[in-house]
Image (cartoon, rainbow, N blue to C red):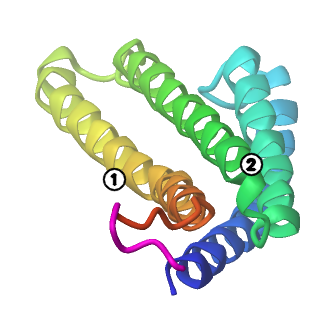
Amino acid sequence: MTANRGMKMIKVSGILMVIFGGLGALFGIGAFLASLTGSMLYDPVQQIFAIISTAASIYIGVYGIQNADKTEMAQNIVIMGVILLALRIVGVVTSIFQIMSLDPFASLDPEIAEFAYPIFIVSLVIGTVIGAAFACVLPILYIVGGNMNKKSGVPLQLPPGNAEQ
């Protein structure tokens, strides 16, 4: 029963990682090109990191889909899920630092900017944290599914005295 649920969890999260990773790659490439023209607030380095992260998401998702039913691959699935989760966390931290360095109100009256800037930063940070929570859900489900598969692959150990004759 656990193997079946673990396998389903890996397959579903893997499929969603491929779908959202593909969309993220498309948007990431567009954002990278826009950042090169100076028309966006994001720097090219952050956009390259986002493209790498989405490419990893696609690869790890495909790997999980192909190996979800193989309990011997469960450890690799867990490790890849942890790597993807780490990439997502690093991406969120760099986004927060970038948000903190923004000064979009430089051309406004200082009194208005003094009032609006904290609201702007707080709303961006809250949006980033909420986005981070959603970004981390799939890798966490992937890890949990891998652990369920790993546990189901361990042979049953009978207690002493109950061995089959």
Residue 24 in view here: no
Which residue does the image show at 81% across and 68% down from the upper left?
Answer: 65
Extent of the magenta region: 160-165
Question: If the image is split into quadrants, where does the C terminus sit?
Answer: bottom right
86 and 125: which is toward the camera: 86
In terms of depth relative to the viewer, which is nearer, 107 or 45? 45
What secondary structure is the stretch in magenta mostly built from? loop
- Whether residue 72 is visible here, answered yes or no, is yes
Residue type (three-letter) at the residue carrying disc 1:
Ile
Q: Position of residue 137 (x, y in %)?
A: 45, 59
- Please report the residue visible at 47 percent of the width from the left and 54 percent of the height from the top: 140
Name the one closer to the observer, 122 or 73: 73
Please give left or right for residue 51 compared with residue 161 in the image.
Answer: right
* Identity of the residue drawn at 65% across and 68% down: 10
Q: Which mark is residue 164?
A: none
Residue under pointer 2: 57
Does residue 165 appear left or right of residue 153 in this picture? left
- Report crowding for label 2: few under 14, some 14 to 19, many 20 or more residues within 10 A (C-alpha): many
* Crowd band around label 1 with a 10 angstrom C-alpha radius: few (<14), some (14–19), many (20+): few
